[in-house]
Image (cartoon, rainbow, N blue to C red):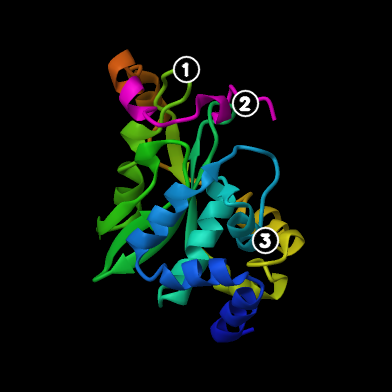
Amino acid sequence: MNIAAFITTFEARLPKNLLKIFNQLNTPFKIQQYLDGLTYIGEERDRSPLNVMLDHQGHCLDGGFLAALCLWRIGFKPLLIDIVPDPDVDDDHVLALYQIEGRWGALAKSNYVNLGFREPVYKNLRELVMSYFEHYVSVHQQKCLTGYTHIFNAANYTRYNWAWDEAGANKVYYKHFYGRKPISLITKSMAKRLNPVTDRNYASETLFTDLKESFGNREH
């Protein structure tokens, strides 16, 4: 399915009020503002972009794919990466990417205020991902970002109807997006030397955060 047909099919499933909102998301920053207005919920359910909008809630994975869809509609490719911590320390975090004048920026739905929008000023993906490093902290006040994946182009998976079909979206998420080997950001010796996050910095990083929804705290 080509981009026009894919977007048109998605739009046909939106109620009029949400279609109006969707069509107003015509810049990366406006898309990010919409993501910021959604309720963050760190549940096991992974919604399709359609259900994120219908339910007005989501997390970084389904919010990231919604952001990629919105970027695709306004002329960017629907590109995503996963930035990852050490296993069992924190959640991974999904970024929707965009590029202007050869520089990378990112959008994301997050429970943490500093893990969202990035201006398109970064020369390469590693530089972009490292902008999240000092902000990627666990509830135990550890810096825990250790890697990132290669770029994933969601345009290659329209056969799954991932924008509106939740079963299809989950096939894309778990058969194709997840499970790819990450690229390391830091060495093991670097990780051992990392200092803890101070109480003051942790307070600033978790401003507006619902800590009940954070990895290690949530019950669902």
At label 2, the amino acid type is Arg
Specify whether residue 217 is painted magenta: yes
| Label 2: how many Cα within 10 Å (few below 14, some 14–19, many 20+) | few
Q: Is residue 208 left or right of residue 210?
A: left
Chain-order first, disc 3 or disc 1: 1
- Specify which label sits upstream in the sequence, 2 or 3: 3
Name the spot of residue 184 as percent of width and height, x first: 44, 41
On the picture, is 89 further left or further right than 34?
right
Q: Disc 2 or disc 3, which is closer to the eye?
A: 2
Element under disc 1: loop
Identify which residue, 147 or 12, lies in the foreground.
12
Which amino acid, by three-letter code, is at mark 3?
Val
Q: How many marks?
A: 3
Q: In the rendered structure, find residue 97 and report the number of the disc placed on it.
A: none
Q: Position of residue 45 (x, y in %)?
A: 70, 45
Question: Which residue corresponds to mark 3?
Answer: 172
Viewport quadrant of the N terminus: bottom right
Q: What residue does disc 2 label? A: 218
Near mark 1 (Cα within 10 A), the count class, few <14, some 14-19 or many ≥20, is few
Question: Label 3, label 1: how many angstroms apart (C-alpha)?
Answer: 32 Å
Overall secondary structure of the magenta stretch?
loop
Whether the magenta-drawn stretch holds residue 44 is answered as no
Q: Residue at x 26, y 69 (%)?
A: 102
Label 2 to label 3: alpha-carbon separation = 25 Å
Q: Position of residue 218 (x, y in %)?
A: 62, 26
The residue to which callout 1 is attached is 140
- Amino acid found under the numbered disc labelled 1: His
> Where 136 sits versus 17, above or below?
above
Secondary structure beneath label 3: helix
Specify which label sits upstream in the sequence, 2 or 1.
1
Residue drawn at (58%, 58%) of the image: 53
Element under label 2? loop
